[in-house]
């Protein structure tokens, strides 16, 4: 009992969910397309604007980090270059003792309220208390710089800066930070003499800074009088290269969103078009069903109630009217049933060998009899040409094409029918000299329920199933159907049927 209760509850919930979905979809379909398009465009603009804002912020942050990275790399390379020079000085014993006495670390200790007690014989002094600077920055970074600059000033008295070593260390440090190749120029400049270049080195050797090149400074002198200057091209290209993964991902997401919104819009348009065509079909099929029924009913009523059966001529006329209307109803029902059968999985064609010329002659004779306007037929078919197909559906396909050629002709119809073999196919054409089909309407011509606007021909009846039937049946035969048409010059429909 519990299992059955659960299943019943599940079925009820499923029906409610389907009902809600149907209601939601109907509400969407009732919204004007312009409003839907406006919402979609606004949504896309919002997504793209937020993505652009986020990427711009990320670029600005990475650009700032890149600038800081270059300056920090200069500082780290300067420190490593000093260590290499210190190691080389240790190998000279005569200089080593003097260096050790000069670098008395106890005399360079810094307290919170005092200045660094650097050796005065080298002319070193600091005019600003270190403690106040540390308090302003809230970090020991500046204190580290002071110590590094102090050591620098002592070491430079014994040995000069090796710019080649510095450049090698600079490139190596950049590589460790993910920057493999960066053309640059490193200079040692004297700021006391308006940035006079003391030494300079291009890396690679042929690199020359361009007009847009930017420079970065790192002052290694205790008095900020001597500085390293780094010349590089604008770093925005380097930043964009580092962002390429994020940019590619963002671009891919934007493309996916654009395609998704485009597909959604296309589906909505198609659904709205199908709804409109179904409404037209309902009106047309109602009219098509009511008219022959009403005519047959009136003729039958005349026979029964108004003594129409007493006169043989009238009786024959009324019976002929009833028969014609029933044929019309039968043809309409047959096409509707064919559409239903085609959609079933167990639908099968009954293939047989059909000689085309006799079948086409029979079709021409029937359409000539029921034509409501003057019509001239031209038949071009080879004798003995046969095709393997379903007789009923092939007959209906050609009949539909002839019927359309007659409907969409003016007061006088001229129709040409031809059949010929071409390789492994039979080519069957039905051509007319009617009103033609506009180029922008031809792509929808074989859609279900679709009808081409007829302009001044208001007497053209139909329900938008004829050409759809032709297309579905020829595809069941593994063939194709195509149309060539121009407004005012007529149309030619071509069936290509495998042998």
Image (cartoon, grey):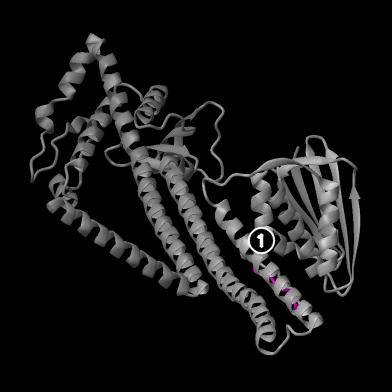
- In magenta stretch: residue 459: yes
Residue 336 higher or lower than 354, as above or below: below
Q: Nearer the viewer, residue 347 or 167?
A: 347
Position of the C terminus, as image quadrant, is: top right
Is residue 381 visible in the rendered image? The answer is yes
SS class of the residue under badge 1? helix
* Left or right: 200 in relation to 468: left
* Left or right: 37 in relation to 472: left
* Left or right: 36 in relation to 379: left
Is residue 195 visible in the rendered image? The answer is no
Q: Nearer the viewer, residue 186 or 405?
A: 405
* Left or right: 307 in relation to 232: right
- In magenta stretch: residue 447: no
Q: Quadrant of residue 228?
A: top left
Q: What residue is rendered at 42% in x and 59% in y?
A: 47
> Which residue reaches farthest front?
310
How many C-alpha atoms fall within 10 Å of the one at disc 1: few (<14), some, or many (≥20)? Answer: few
Q: Position of residue 127 (x, y in %)?
A: 20, 46
> Which residue reaches farthest bottom?
306
Main secondary structure along the magenta-highlighted residues? loop
Q: Position of residue 419 (x, y in %)?
A: 85, 47
Q: Position of residue 496 (x, y in %)?
A: 76, 45
- Highlighted magenta segment, given as a residue range: 458-466
Q: Position of residue 298 (x, y in %)?
A: 67, 84
Q: What residue is rendered at 40% in x and 52% in y?
A: 55
Location of mark 1 (residue) = 444
């Amino acid at each position: 009992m519990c299992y059955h209760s659960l299943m019943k509850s599940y079925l009820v919930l499923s029906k409610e969910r389907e009902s809600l979905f149907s209601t939601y979809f109907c509400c969407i379909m009732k919204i004007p397309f312009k409003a839907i398009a406006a919402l979609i465009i606004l949504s896309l603009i919002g997504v793209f604007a937020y993505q652009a804002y986020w990427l711009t912020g990320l670029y600005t942050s990475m650009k700032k980090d890149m600038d800081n990275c270059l300056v920090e790399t200069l500082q780290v390379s300067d420190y490593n270059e000093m260590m290499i020079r210190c190691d080389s000085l240790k190998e000279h014993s005569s200089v080593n003792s003097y260096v050790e006495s000069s670098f008395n670390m106890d005399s360079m200790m810094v307290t919170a309220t005092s200045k660094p007690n650097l050796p005065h014989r080298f002319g070193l002094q600091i005019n600003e208390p270190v403690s106040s600077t540390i308090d302003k920055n809230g970090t020991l970074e500046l204190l580290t710089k002071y110590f590094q600059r102090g050591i620098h000033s002592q070491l430079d008295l014994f040995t000069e800066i090796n710019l080649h070593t510095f450049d090698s260390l600079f490139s190596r440090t950049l590589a460790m930070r993910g920057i493999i190749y960066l053309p640059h120029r490193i200079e040692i400049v004297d700021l006391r003499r308006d940035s006079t270049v003391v030494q300079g080195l291009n890396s690679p050797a042929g690199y020359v800074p361009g007009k847009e090149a930017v420079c970065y400074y790192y002052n290694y002198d205790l008095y900020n009088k001597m500085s390293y200057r780094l010349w590089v091209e604008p770093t925005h290209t380097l930043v964009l290269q580092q962002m390429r993964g994020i940019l590619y991902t963002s671009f891919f997401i934007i493309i996916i969103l654009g395609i998704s919104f485009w597909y959604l819009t296309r589906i909505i348009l198609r659904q709205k078009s199908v709804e409109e065509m179904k409404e037209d079909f309902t009106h047309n099929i109602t009219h098509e069903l009511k008219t022959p029924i009403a005519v047959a009913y009136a003729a039958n009523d005349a026979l029964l109630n108004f003594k129409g059966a007493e006169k043989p001529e009238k009786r024959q006329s009324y019976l002929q009217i009833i028969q014609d209307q029933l044929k019309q109803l039968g043809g309409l029902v047959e096409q509707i049933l064919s559409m239903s059968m085609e959609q079933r999985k167990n639908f099968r064609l009954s293939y047989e060998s059909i000689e085309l010329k006799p079948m086409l002659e029979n079709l021409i004779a029937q359409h000539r009899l029921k034509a409501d306007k003057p019509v001239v037929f031209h038949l071009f078919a080879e004798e003995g040409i046969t095709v393997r197909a379903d007789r009923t559906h092939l007959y209906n396909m050609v009949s539909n094409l002839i019927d359309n050629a007659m409907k969409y002709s003016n007061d006088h119809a001229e129709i040409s029918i031809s059949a010929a073999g071409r390789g492994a196919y039979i080519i069957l054409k039905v051509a007319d000299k009617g009103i033609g089909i506009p180029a922008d309407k031809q792509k929808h011509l074989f859609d279900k329920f679709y009808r081409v606007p007829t302009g001044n021909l208001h007497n053209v009846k139909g329900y938008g199933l004829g050409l759809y039937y032709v297309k579905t049946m020829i595809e069941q035969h593994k063939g194709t159907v195509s149309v060539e048409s121009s407004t005012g010059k007529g149309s030619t429909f071509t069936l290509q049927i495998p042998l």
